[in-house]
Amino acid sequence: MDKQKPVNAPVPPQSVKEPESQPASLPSPSLVPKGITIGMAAFALILSLAGYGFRLLIGEDVGEVLRHAAVIVPAFMIGIPLFFWVGSRILNKVKGLHIASWNAISLGYLTSCISILWLMGTYS
């Protein structure tokens, strides 16, 4: 025989779990995989160094080529990505945006690669 609960029976209190919020210390997820960013950085390095090999092959002065490379390569490898990263930090503070640092660096390397290719196309 089946026992049934009375209609007016009190309901035992259940432990109510509130949704756990993520701690503020966890970084926000990045949209761009780190491998893509590393690949773009390697591509930017190869592109920025590519023209100097040709300049040396045609007989330009090694010192002049190295001085030019000492300015241009760091500008594309460090300067542009750093500019985007600093800009993302400022926008995060001022506007309250949530731009992931890795995304900003990825955009910096993408811009670097495009700029180098544009310069190569202009001077070829």
Image (cartoon, grey):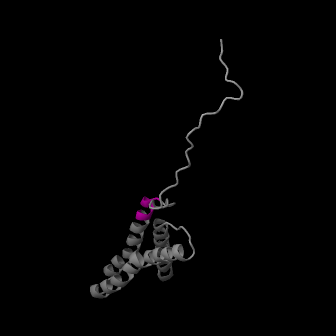
Q: Can residue 59 be seen in this view?
A: no
Q: Which residue is drawn at 35% across and 79% down?
A: 52
Looking at the rendered image, the quarter that the N terminus falls into is: top right
Q: Which residue is drawn at 42% across and 77% down?
A: 76
Decide which of 68, 40 is in the foreground and name it. Answer: 40
Q: For this view, does 83 lie left or right of residue 97? A: left
Picture mark count:
0
Decide which of 9, 78 is in the foreground and name it. Answer: 9
Q: Is residue 87 visible?
A: yes
Residue 36 sits in which quadrant? bottom left
Q: Which residue is drawn at 55% across and 77% down?
A: 94
Image: 35 above or below 11: below
Magenta residues, start to end = 33-38
Decide which of 40, 68 is in the foreground and name it. Answer: 40
Image: 5 above or below 30: above
Q: Position of residue 44 (x, y in %)?
A: 42, 71
Residue 13 sits in which quadrant? top right
Decide which of 61, 106 is in the foreground and name it. Answer: 106
Q: Which residue reaches farthest top?
A: 1
Q: Which residue reaches farthest left?
A: 63
Indicate whether residue 36 is drawn in magenta: yes
Predominant SS of the magenta segment: helix
Q: Position of residue 109 (x, y in %)?
A: 45, 71
Q: Where is residue 31 in the image (x, y as percent from the top left)?
A: 51, 60
Indicate whether residue 5 is drawn in magenta: no
Q: For this view, does 11 lie left or right of residue 103? A: right
